[in-house]
Amino acid sequence: MELRGNFTSRIGFILAAAGSAVGLGNIWRFPYLAGQNGGAAFLLIYLIFIFLLCFPVLVGEIAIGRSAGRDAYGSYSLLGGKRWGYLGIFGILAGIFILSFYNVVAGWAFGYFLEISFGNLLGEPDFGKFFGNYVNDISDNLWFSLGFMVITALIVSRGIQKGVEAANKIMMPALYTILILLILYSLTLPNAWAGVRFYLVPELNEINSQTIYDGLKQAFFSLSLGMGCLITYGSYVGKTQNIIKSAAIISVADAMVAFLAGFMIFPMVFSQNISPTEGPALVFIVLPDVFRDMGPLLGRIIGGSFFLLLCFAALTSTISLLEVPTTYVVDQLKFRRTRVVWFLALLIFILGLPTMFSQGMIPALNKLPFYLNRDWLSFVSDMCDISLTVGGCLMCIFIVRQWKIHNMDAELVNGNPGYMNSFMRKYLHVMITWVCPVLLGGLSVLIIDRYFGLGVFF
Ligand code: PHE
């Protein structure tokens, strides 16, 4: 059997976990959700969820993973018996489905990066039309998302230290640097401060149930919670590391990128007098307009850097998404990592095909029947969102009822001798025993009810 290996250092783990967290969710989805939900009001809700509800779940997941030292299924079943192992399987499946559509969107970003860098994109007269054709051009889509999956698989197949950790150590600092440079530039644009105001001054009457649901699902997705990703990464963490401290840094690093992405995008959007409520098209249709107006050379540099940033962010997340089922198969079936990685990459790429076809190419996938009533991409991504909050809720129940919270404490003391007498311990107990499961469970039920229009509560 191959040795599992560990992250070599605290910073290696933190960068990898932050890399998983920081992704399309922060740079693509967060700004458009914020744009649709009143800007600052959404930011506020999102930050409250990250630090209040998500942080304890993050700590819990890492503790489970490090304690058991196995994949998501193996960890749950080792600590809680086979029945709880299904919770791990549920998470692994959610991860596989997330990667299936995530990789397609990452492929769009990759394609845009290449098109802008080679100077093709900015000559387009109408980006709305361009994007519509682009997502329907099967050959481009196939190549770009296949390319993205191959890069992901190449990195994951090299293992935790030489692949995952090494790639994150390069890409994460690069990502922050590009982001800061782009913000500095975007603040110099005309009318930039109107964008900053929209983003920073909350109109509290903008907060409604939709803001709360969107904030919750975004916070969970953004921190990669509820599907065993952090159990998997946690299983490669050494016993001397302070989990609480690492989790705090990971949460801040993730929230910071979402926050900064808004700082970069809203000034750009407002400088063009465009409405920030464009939705998913914001990054692919609105921003290219902004880049074109910068002139051919600057547009290519700034636009190219933006899409490179998006690709780096996506790649550090696809790596973690592929790692989850990979660790599962390697741990459970003891197959060679390289083979497992390529097999899973191919399988998930194929699972992503309906997403590719759902943007207009195949009408039945563009508008699913009955209650579903949306395209396949939105459907799968919504289902995954729901499964993350449900997964987070069940994880809390697992810790309290099965694993027992004193075992979590015993795990958290490693690397953090002062934990037993800390306020943090009391806080985590209250949150994981009561607040998180009740709120996550309750909100998940409301979201499902609203989503399928069941009308039980609305
Ligand atoms: N957190 C990633 C993002 O924000 C997405 C992701 C979800 C990655 C779940 C891994 C697991 O884009």
Image (cartoon, rainbow, N blue to C red):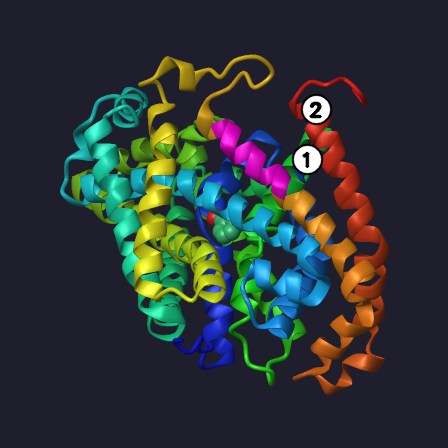
Mark 1: give few (<14), some (14-19) or many (20+) Cα within 10 Å: some
Q: Residue 407 appears at what percent x and percent y? A: 77, 73
Q: Foreground: 40 or 313?
A: 313
What is the magenta segment's predominant secondary structure?
helix
**Labels 1 and 2 touching (C-beta < 8 A):** yes
Can residue 438 be found in the magenta stretch? no
Which amino acid type is marked by label 1? Tyr
Can residue 380 be found in the magenta stretch? yes
Viewed as shown, does residue 178 lie left or right of 120?
Answer: right
Using the rendered image of the protein, determine whether residue 263 is visible from the camera's viewpoint: no
What's the CA distance linking mark 1 and mark 2?
Answer: 10 Å
Using the rendered image of the protein, determine whether residue 408 is visible from the camera's viewpoint: yes
Give the position of the N terminus as an image quadrant: bottom left
Image point (68%, 40%), residue name = 202
| Pointer 2 residue | 450
Viewed as shown, does residue 265 lie left or right of 52?
Answer: left
Q: Residue 153, which numbered label?
A: none
Mark 1 beta carbon near ligand 1 (under 8 Å) = no
Q: Residue 421 appears at what percent x and percent y? A: 84, 81
Number of numbered tags placed on the structure image: 2
Q: Nearer the viewer, mark 1 or mark 2?
A: 2
Q: Residue 53 appears at what percent x and percent y? A: 73, 53
Mark 2: give few (<14), some (14-19) or many (20+) Cα within 10 Å: some
Give the position of the C terminus as an image quadrant: top right
Image point (43%, 45%), residue name = 99
Q: Foreground: 23 or 65?
A: 65
Image quarter of residue 404: bottom right
Q: Is residue 96 above or below residue 19?
A: above
